[in-house]
Image (cartoon, rainbow, N blue to C red):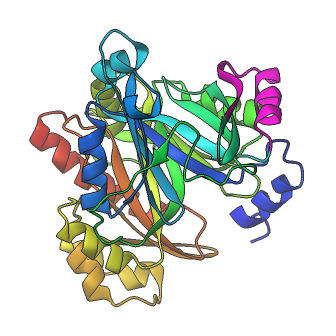
């Protein structure tokens, strides 16, 4: 297929004014960073990395960074009320605040994007300690979500200046999570085209896939989605907006309980989804389940796959194929009490797409959970 996703990405990579090297970290604003970090170590297999707080000279916050392979999560909590971080948590609950992107030149990234209309949330600043320096800048995106540009080529420390190494006696085994595959944003009614244009004009992304309410709908609800990607494909941001349906869609439920636009889920890549999901389930991570009938004609739909069918069925893992291969994916239930943030676990066997063939089964599973909450 001459206009495959891979072809379109390669054509775009040649003219990329904002070359991104990938996701540097994802920062969550949370009510209790110490407990959040413990949860992600216990449930997801992250390892202690770095800590910042009063002991390191940051008097107003406590912040814990954890890592697994190329995946870094940061949990930050305010130590007092009456500030923007405390207000954020009160309004949204625990959620993603910063999607930090690795760049070679953070000043240039900020200059290029603000010149194209981005609103700055952090003018370029140089952070220094004994391990070198990191340049950080940032721009605002949908809702109260920010993108930081992180330039760390002259830094040898664990995470960032201002953080100290976090040594811990409690280090559960990893679960095989590798890196951020993509992050999905939920935006309000009729807002998707605005944010598609933002990523195109301000950050030089391309819309590589689009799904409308014919692709993503059930008997009750619908949504629309467009996938934005950098030229090299290292950073992908699908954007969802609600569409008209008989009842409340999952995006509407998110917008209501998150109290605005925000990051709906982070997709985490693994090289062996069966091993990873088995480990996650054994640690208490709960996943959405599709009906057993989904597997009856799975191989007819997707063709031959390397994995045995029975473990996929037992774990509830979904499979889909595109012109470049296939993928395996599964979605957690919300990890907060508010039905907002959740995680996707994904293993790509060549596929560059996002599981279009699974949408109906997946969203019906989400609706069953919404109905239990009384929010459908």
Q: Position of residue 273 (x, y in %)?
A: 38, 75
Residue depicted at 58% across the width and 27% down the height: 141
| Front residue of this view, candidates 367 and 175 | 175
In magenta, the rendered stretch is 105-127
Check if residue 162 falls in the magenta segment: no
Quadrant showing the C terminus:
top left
Q: Position of residue 330 (x, y in %)?
A: 34, 64
Q: Furthest residue to the top?
A: 82
Evaluate whether residue 26 shows in this view. Answer: yes
Q: Is residue 354 above or below residue 246?
A: below
Residue depicted at 62% across the width and 35% down the height: 148
Is 104 positioned to the left or the right of 214 in the image? Answer: right
Location of residue 125 (image quadrant)? top right
Is 193 positioned to the left or the right of 163 in the image? Answer: right
Residue depicted at 21% across the width and 68% down the height: 281
Check if residue 116 falls in the magenta segment: yes
| Front residue of this view, candidates 42 and 292 | 42
Quadrant showing the N terminus:
bottom right
Q: Is residue 171 above or below residue 66?
A: below
Is 15 positioned to the left or the right of 233 in the image? Answer: right
């Amino acid at each position: 297929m001459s206009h495959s996703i891979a072809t379109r990405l390669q054509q775009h990579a040649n003219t990329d004014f904002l070359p991104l090297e990938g996701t540097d970290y994802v920062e969550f604003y949370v009510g209790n960073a110490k407990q959040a970090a413990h949860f992600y170590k216990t449930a997801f297999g992250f390892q202690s990395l770095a800590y910042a707080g009063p002991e390191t000279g940051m008097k107003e916050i406590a912040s814990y960074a954890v890592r697994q392979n190329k995946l870094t999560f940061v949990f930050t909590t305010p130590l007092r009320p009456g500030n923007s971080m405390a207000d954020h948590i009160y309004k949204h609950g625990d959620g993603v605040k910063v999607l930090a992107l690795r760049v070679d030149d953070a000043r240039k990234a900020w200059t290029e994007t603000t010149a194209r209309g981005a609103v700055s949330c952090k003018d370029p600043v140089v952070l220094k300690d004994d391990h070198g320096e990191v340049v950080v800048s940032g721009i605002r995106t949908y809702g109260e979500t920010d993108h930081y540009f992180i330039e760390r080529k002259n830094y040898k420390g664990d995470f960032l200046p201002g953080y100290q190494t976090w040594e811990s006696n409690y280090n559960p085994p990893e679960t095989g999570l590798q890196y951020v595959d993509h992050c999905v944003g939920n935006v309000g009614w009729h807002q998707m085209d605005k944010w598609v244009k933002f990523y195109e004009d301000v950050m030089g992304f391309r819309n590589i896939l689009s799904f409308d309410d014919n692709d993503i709908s059930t008997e009750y609800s619908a949504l629309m989605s467009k996938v934005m990607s950098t030229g090299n494909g290292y950073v992908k941001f699908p954007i969802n907006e609600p569409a008209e349906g008989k009842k409340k869609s999952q995006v509407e439920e998110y917008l209501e309980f998150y109290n605005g636009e925000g990051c709906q889920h982070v997709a985490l890549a693994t090289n062996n989804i069966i091993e990873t999901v088995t480990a996650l389930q054994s640690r208490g991570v709960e996943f959405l389940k599709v009906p057993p009938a989904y597997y009856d004609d799975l191989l007819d739909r997707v063709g031959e796959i390397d994995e045995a069918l029975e473990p996929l069925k037992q774990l509830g893992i979904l499979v889909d194929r595109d012109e470049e291969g296939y993928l395996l994916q599964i979605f957690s239930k919300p990890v907060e009490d508010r039905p907002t943030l959740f995680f996707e676990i994904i293993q790509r066997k060549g596929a560059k797409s996002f599981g279009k063939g699974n949408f109906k089964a997946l969203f019906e599973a989400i609706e069953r959970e919404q109905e239990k909450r009384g929010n459908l």
